[in-house]
Amino acid sequence: METEEEMGATRGIAILGGTGFIGLHLTRRLLRLPDVHITLVDNLSRGKLDAEVEALLASNSSVQFVEADLTDRSAVEGLGSGFDEVYLLAGMVGVRITQEAPDRVAFVNAMIVLNVLEWLKAVPSTRLVYASTSEAYAGAIGLGGHFHVPTDEDVLVAIDDVRNPRSTYAASKILGECAVMAHHQVHGLHAAVVRYHNVYGPRMGYEHVIPELSVRLLQGNDPCDVYGWDQTRAFCYVDDAVEGTMAVMAADQAAGEIFHIGTDLETPIAELAGALCRVAGVAPALGQLPAPPGSVARRCPDISKARRVLDYAPTVNLEQGLQATFAWYKAAYHADGTESR
């Protein structure tokens, strides 16, 4: 690990979970700034660095990769102290993994944030942005007047059923938010929380509505099944999410605050499916299927706080974002019907 002296006047940035979806897009954006040195930290739970990360590392000396298990306290401390900013994006996420290994989700997500916060006690000048999720308040939906759409940061966070395996992800993120705020209050850590809302874009994986539907369209499915037809979401293109995240890191007044990062345009899944078909240039019959059990019927963030405090303003509309996203999945999709990951 390079020291601050070796870095010179550069700004040292650590992105924990840096080879993931948002991590790579964030890295590319940060590299447009002068005098930055970025360390991508990941445990390679997906098995290996993909071609895009390898190309980035090979082409830019301002980025280095460190393989580390952030659930291991000694591995976190081994990252050193030469960082001005830490983006904590690492964690286990996804409906499938929470159903199959909820115990692992709870352990990994809790240990990562607790280890990182203990590490940063020794580096009090470091700024931290912690990536949380709209799932933190999903359990509040049944609480009547306590829940509104669009939803602001003052909504109650809640778990509606601790026996539901899907609750482990939300609970781990609630714990993370509490721990981050506690370290800000007790130890003076300059820390803030971002709750992401349906961020999408190239290289986001294959377990979300947009890539799942893209693959079905590439397979030529007709009819093409669309799950959650009658639900709504507010889809935020990854470039806009990255701009919001960087704004939180840069703002002095963001310390000790939570920000909803997304767009405030609520879109029916039926409308999303039609738009993606237009982008793909196909017109299959669309199967109108219910969402998986436990899925939230409506989700749209109130981003007025981010607009006011951070001057945050999403600029990529849904059609533009879908065009870029579908183009990536089309290129990654093999002629034999398999995906290149």
Image (cartoon, grey):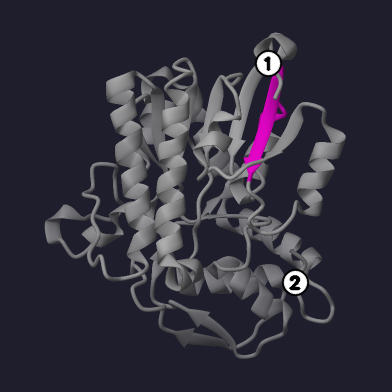
Residue 10 horizontal/vertical position (percent): 69, 14
How dense is the environment of label 2, judged by Cα within 10 Å: few (below 14), some, or many (20 and up)? some
The answer to whether residue 140 is above or below residue 258 is below
| Residues at discs 2 and 1 in contact (Cβ within 8 Å) | no
Look at the image and say whether residue 341 sits in the magenta stretch.
no
Q: Is residue 182 above or below residue 341?
A: above
Q: Position of residue 77 (x, y in %)?
A: 54, 29
Q: Which quadrant holds the C terminus?
A: bottom right
Amino acid carrying mark 1 in the image = Thr
Q: Is residue 121 left or right of residue 158?
A: right
Residue type indicated by callout 2: Glu
Q: Position of residue 184 (x, y in %)?
A: 33, 25
Quadrant of residue 325 within the rendered picture: bottom right
Q: Which mark is residue 339?
A: 2
Q: Identify whether 132 is placed above or below 300.
A: above
**Residue in the image at 78% along x and 65% along y:** 332
Name the residue nearer the viewer: 206 or 148: 206
Label 1 sits on residue: 3
Q: Nearer the observer, disc 2 or disc 1?
A: 1
Question: Which element is circle 2 on?
Answer: loop
For the N terminus, the image quarter is top right
Identity of the residue drawn at 84% across and 78% down: 335
| Residues drawn in magenta | 30-42
